[in-house]
Image (cartoon, rainbow, N blue to C red):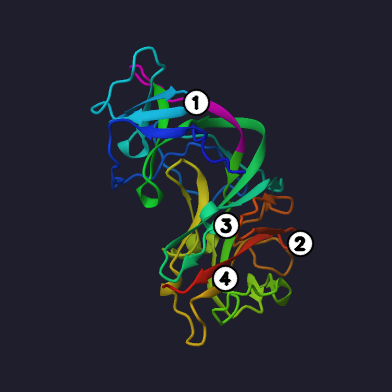
Amino acid sequence: MKRGAVNRATRTCVLAGAVWLPAAAWANPPNLSFPVVLPEGAGLSLRTGPTAPRLEGHWWYGWSEGQETVVCAPSTCTPPPGVDVWRVYPQDEGGYWRAGVRAGTPGASVDVSEVDWSDALENTTWSTASAVRVETTLYTALAEPLPAYEMLHLYGQGNREMRGVVASNTEPSLPSLTESGDATVVTPCARLTLQKLEASDSATRPSSERFHWNAAVGEWSGAAYTLVNSALWEKAERGHGDGLSAEVDIGGRALFRYDWEPGRAALPSHVSAAGWYRLTFSLDGSVAGGKRCGAYVLNTSMTEAEVEVGEQYPAVVDPVWNLSYLDVYVRQKD
């Protein structure tokens, strides 16, 4: 189940009297629109601002027509009479809002209810020429709801996508504030391990029984080659600019991200860039004798989490090792 920032994504979004626009380059990170829990009290840098939401800059009109949501720039259209009109302030316009943030209590475990690997990973066969955005989102159910802001897709996809917060068509304009019974989870103990399972480019999926999790090094023994073995706390401690990161996406949701280009990886000469890979999202500090989480004590558990089963590449949760993994095939570029 995809949760993400509260939005009107269940309706078809139509641009009225407008053209697709490139996403602008902007200095500030996106505003947090969906609540986040920090079980260890760290792991995510959030945009700072005033104590109350502030909306500014250019905005778009939005209204509903049956099951469709229409959005357009005021310079290109006029809403029809009699409809309920709202404004949508894009993330790149300099306004500020922040959904609820809750820090964990030491010794009190936060149970992850769902591990969400992105649809693109679960349902796409990439090639050695692809640029793959590896995104993993953890969700937890809240005993008490936290504030969330309603978001709407405006234009574009991927790196060119833009979303905005729904607000009243008044002066001053007020953002649409709701409450959410779910939140994302960000932990500095998160580790991403990316491994080539076999040296060959065979399309036959290797048997999982051949690979065994080695918690002491944070990877699967039996794999042909390890490309990435990166924990969030290590990146922060050592000041590395690459590796796994935690960020807020354009929809205002906190998640984990790694950018992977299979054809650019420095592999040994006997290892093909095409073939089967395993992406593993694990938590340092999960077991005795395993990787420790730096100066942090792990408060996050994925042992009872669910995963959405992709059509091509189903994700797995391993409750014994407190991790989730996804096997994907990368084909040779045509």
Above or below residue 54? Residue 43 is: below
Q: Characterize the local packing of mark 3: few (<14), some (14-19) or many (20 or more) Cα atoms within 10 angstroms.
A: many
Question: Which badge, 2 or 3, comes first in the chain's sequence?
Answer: 3
Compared with 226, 27 (above or below) is: above
The magenta segment: 169-182
Of badges 3 and 4, the one in the foreground is: 3
Return the disc, 2 or 4, that comes first in the chain's sequence. Answer: 4
Element on which disc 4 rests: strand
Earlier-in-chain disc, 1 versus 2 = 1
Give the Cα separation between the discs numbered 1 and 3: 32 Å
Q: How far across and how far down the image is residue 191, in percent?
A: 58, 62
Question: Which circle marks residue 230 in the picture?
Answer: none
Earlier along the polypeptide chain: callout 4 or callout 1? Answer: 1
Q: Residue at x 66, y 43 (%)?
A: 105
- Which residue matches tag 3? 122
Question: Residue flagged by tag 3: what amino acid is it?
Answer: Glu
Q: Residues within 10 Å of mark 2 (few under 14, many from 20)?
A: few
Residue marked by disc 2 = 320
- Which of label 4 and label 1 is nearer to you? 4
| Residue located beneath label 1 in the image | 177
N-term-proximal mark, 1 vs 3? 3
Between label 2 and label 4, give the one nearer the viewer.
4
Residue depth check, mark 2 versus mark 3: number of the one nearer the observer: 3
Mark 3 vs mark 4, CA separation in Å? 13 Å
How far across and down, in percent of the image, does residue 198 sit? 59, 79
Q: Mark 1: which amino acid? A: Leu
The outermost residue toward the right is 320
Residue 153 lies within the magenta run: no
Q: Amino acid at mark 2?
A: Val
Q: Return the disc, 3 or 4, that comes first in the chain's sequence.
A: 3
- The residue shown at (44%, 75%) is 265
